Amino acid sequence: MTKQVKLVLEDGTEIQGKSFGAFTSAAGEVVFSTAMTGYPENLTDPSFKGQILVLTYPMVGNYGVPGEELYEYVSKVFESDKIHISGLVINYYSEEHSHWNSAKSLGDWLAEYNIPGIYDIDTRLLTKKLREKGAMLGKIVAADDIEMHDPNQDNLVDAVSIPEVQRYGTGKHKIVLVDCGTKSNIIRCLLQRDVELIRVPWDYDFNSIDYDGLFLSNGPGDPKTCEPTISHLKTAYGTEKPIFGICLGNQLMGLAAGGDTFKLKYGHRSHNQPVLLSGTKQCYITSQNHGFALDTKGLPEEWEMLFENLNDGTCEGIKHKSKPFFSVQFHPEAAGGPEDTEFLFDQFLDLVEKHKAEQGS
Ligand SMILES: NC(=O)CC[C@H](N)C(=O)O
């Protein structure tokens, strides 16, 4: 028999729903995503660590969850090796699942990782509330009540990064990937481009490595908790070697440059965020998942805005005016989709190639 559970928000709202996945209580920050597909990718994206995810798309679970498959060293289908959300809130849970690569149901997959799901919730009404009041703390309450918990107080990046250096691939460009909670598709996108990859923990001093290019990954929580990474990045800015950052990586690059970050009211989480390339009329549709943004006002002269969000005018990327350093707030690797901005990986590797040619190496 289906068990009753409730969703409780910090403003006192209580909504009754039905349990699927694990029948357990969980607390976190309640955020919404308007993406229509991609729950296997989203649930395993380490940037969602500590968050209870509300999906506005009304029917969820109907294409099941794929079986694990490897792409060289990392998962081919998921964005990491486990589910990172704290809980899932949906409207209609499809008990039936059918797809060519479906191996299990969404409910069974959540239960495997002891993550609660709640369905029969009017997720669009809930989203309107979150848009009005902003992202809120909340909890899914099963048998036992628990305390609210603000994940942004924790060092979430440390919880999802790797404990020690890992090396992948044998390409001609040596790229250091600073793992603040990297999505697997960043690794796949780099390995498809003639790269030897050195994946290092978030607080590792990568300046001790003789790399050709530096890559800053996405990751969960408040970027200001990444003090060691910001400090190492400041040292890397003293060189001319190419640097590329994505999402949390963009925020860290901005902070290291002297800028500031702030929390957005309810964040950008969807697969259809329009961004404008500065100085052009070229708009790209991008995949996004972030709750903080970079404030460009405080950025020094040598830096400029690279992309702007056309919904709310926030910064979607920055670049250095003379050195090969750039970063984007959206996800060019974009699993699951759209892949329109994947060319940015090629631009990064072109900068690496050019810099090496200039150095005669
Ligand atoms: N996807 C990400 O890297 C998210 C970055 C940061 N944790 C934010 O929410 O803004």
Image (tube, grey):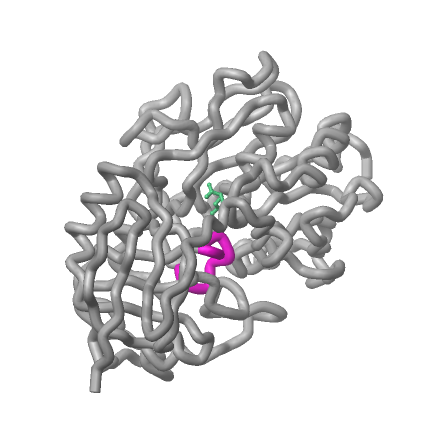
| Quarter in which the N terminus is drawn | bottom left
Q: Position of residue 32 (x, y in %)?
A: 30, 50
The residue depicted at 57 percent of the width and 52 percent of the height is 156
Q: Is residue 121 left or right of residue 193?
A: left
Q: Is residue 319 left or right of residue 18?
A: right
Q: Is residue 143 magenta?
A: no
Relative depth, front residue between 143 and 19? 143
Q: Is residue 164 left or right of residue 23?
A: right
Q: Quadrant of residue 249?
A: top right
Q: Position of residue 221 (x, y in %)?
A: 51, 46
Q: Answer whether residue 61 is visible to the viewer in this image.
A: yes
How many numbered marks does the figure carry? 0
Q: Which residues are magenta?
A: 42-50
Q: Position of residue 37 (x, y in %)?
A: 28, 61
| Quarter in which the C terminus is drawn | top right
View extreme (bottom): residue: 1
The residue depicted at 59 percent of the width and 23 percent of the height is 320
The residue depicted at 53 percent of the width and 41 percent of the height is 222
Q: Is residue 250 left or right of residue 309?
A: right
Compared to 78, does 64 lie above or below?
A: below
Relative depth, front residue between 306 and 258? 258
Q: Quadrant of residue 300?
A: top right
The residue depicted at 73 percent of the width and 49 percent of the height is 174
